[in-house]
Image: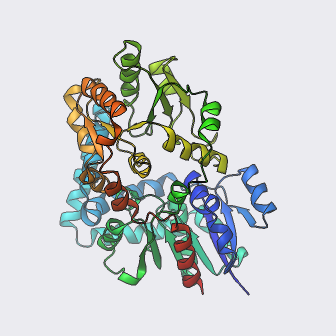
Amino acid sequence: MKRRVLVLIVGQGSITHIIRTGLAERMKDFCEPVIAILWNQEDLIKELRQNNFEVHLIPDISFSAGYVQHRLKINRWYYKEILQTPSTQIQQKYLSQYVALKKKIKKGVTKAVELIGHTIVPGFAEKMIAHEKEMLSREPLYHAYKEWLSALNLQGLFTVTPFLHEVEIMARILDEAKVPLIASIHSFDNITKRGWPGFFFNHYIVWNKYNKKELQRINPALKEKDISITGPPQFDFHFNDQFPESKDEWLNELKLPRDKKIILYSGGSVALFPNEPQYLKHLNDACKHGLIKNAVILFRSHPLDKMERWENYVGKSEFIIYSNAPNGAKKLDFANVTLKDIKRFIATLKYTDLHINFCSTMAVDGSVFDKPQIGPYYDDINPLKQELIRKMYFQEHYLPIMQSKAIHLAHSKEQLIELVNKMLADPDSYNKKCRKCVEEIITCTDGQSTKRVSEILKSFFS
């Protein structure tokens, strides 16, 4: 009999990574995938059941406020003592400009008290972690998960989001029953941007050599054989020439002009970049005043953002075509992603003429298609704090992209417009480093990462 392996779907990324790449279908060859979803996505559940997958809803229970606060306390210790990445301070300082002074003072006092504890109290971290385990044992979520998992009769777990608290708790419960656990990291920034991992999986599958070193840094017990580099399965679509929509179909669906250059602006998340709409407005104003000619802007919102904040800031414009990424009603990430959505996304990468984004993975996506890349490197809304924005480009996960020199930084509104015009006129002068960027971040460019992950899963569960 085949092993029953729990496969977790917790957001849009895991749908793309596991379902749309065909990875779950491949898993049927060597195990029985038991798919569990964190929210009631009726159309996806119906589709999966029609394709003979066993599907369950994960119990809808939240952690208590006290447990969440204790995890945050452990996170602060973890960032300082274990993770030790410059990304933590870079992001915290950048986001602090949007925090009220009273709240800053309160957080500063809390950190100072905890720092004293770390320094002078013997075994402070060990006590915090032991207390977390004790608190977890009293959480209703823990007991609901334990009962639910026991009823499923599982012999394995596979996830692409091992750092999500709900997933981690399931892994800890299954580990107690000696169930083998494996994780494929969905995004290359997850290791250095997530909080304390209360548990380490038996095996990890990662994008690149940097991810492997990061994992071994936070857990030196992980050996070479415990981490595999395969490249990200969701990038396989990028290397399939037959996959995207035709250019005519894409132009028609998005109502794009055929006689103009198309500038792609990929928006960031509202949680990280509240002032980012200023760059779209600068581009729109340049088009209106004839500083950028014979071009339109295709704006694609981030999956974790609402289009309204961009439209409200910039307004409707003959020079901007707004294109929504899928959003969920209960939570932005709780939305289905169809193959049609992905086909349009790949067509957008392929047929636009140049790409603009702020510290985004989209720089890698665009580089696959040899598109010139611009990164806004200024802040007209808060110019006295623009150094904080600039440092965001030098977070640990993003450094290999910067070092590849695929991104061309615009130090001002004027330089942004100048770069746009130069790239539209002569794109080949600005895309020569794209290959280096792609190879550094996704490692494998053969479109076979899904197959490699599948083979590792097969070996792991055999």
Q: Is residue 404 visible?
A: yes
Residue name at image x 28 percent, y 24 percent? 413
Viewer can see residue 74: no
Q: Nearer the viewer, residue 394 or 253?
A: 253
Task: Please name whichever residue, 398 or 67, is drawn nearer the observer in this view of the structure.
Answer: 398
Left or right of residue 132, residue 118 in this image: left
Spot the residue most to the top. Answer: 289
- Colouring mode (rainbow / by chain / secondary structure / one colour): rainbow
**Residue placed most toward the observer, 151 or 239:** 239
Residue 282, percent from left and from top: 35, 22
Q: Position of residue 113 (x, y in %)?
A: 24, 53
Pick the quarter of the image with the N terminus.
bottom right
Q: Quadrant of the C terminus?
A: bottom right
* Depicted 403 relative to depicted 256: above or below: below
Establish if 120 lies above or below 99: below
Tell me residue 87's x, y (percent).
Answer: 28, 53
**Where, by quadrant of the figure, is residue 393 drawn?**
top left
In-image side of 313 versus 303 (left or right):
left
Q: Is residue 37 left or right of residue 135?
A: right
Q: Does residue 104 sit above or below 140 in this rendering?
A: above
Picture quarter containing residue 423?
Answer: top left
In percent of the image, x 45 and y 34: which residue is there?
264
Q: How many numbered tags mark residues here? A: 0
* Residue occupying image coordinates x 39% and y 49%: 367
Residue 149 lies, in percent from the top left, at 66, 72
Q: Residue furthest right?
A: 50
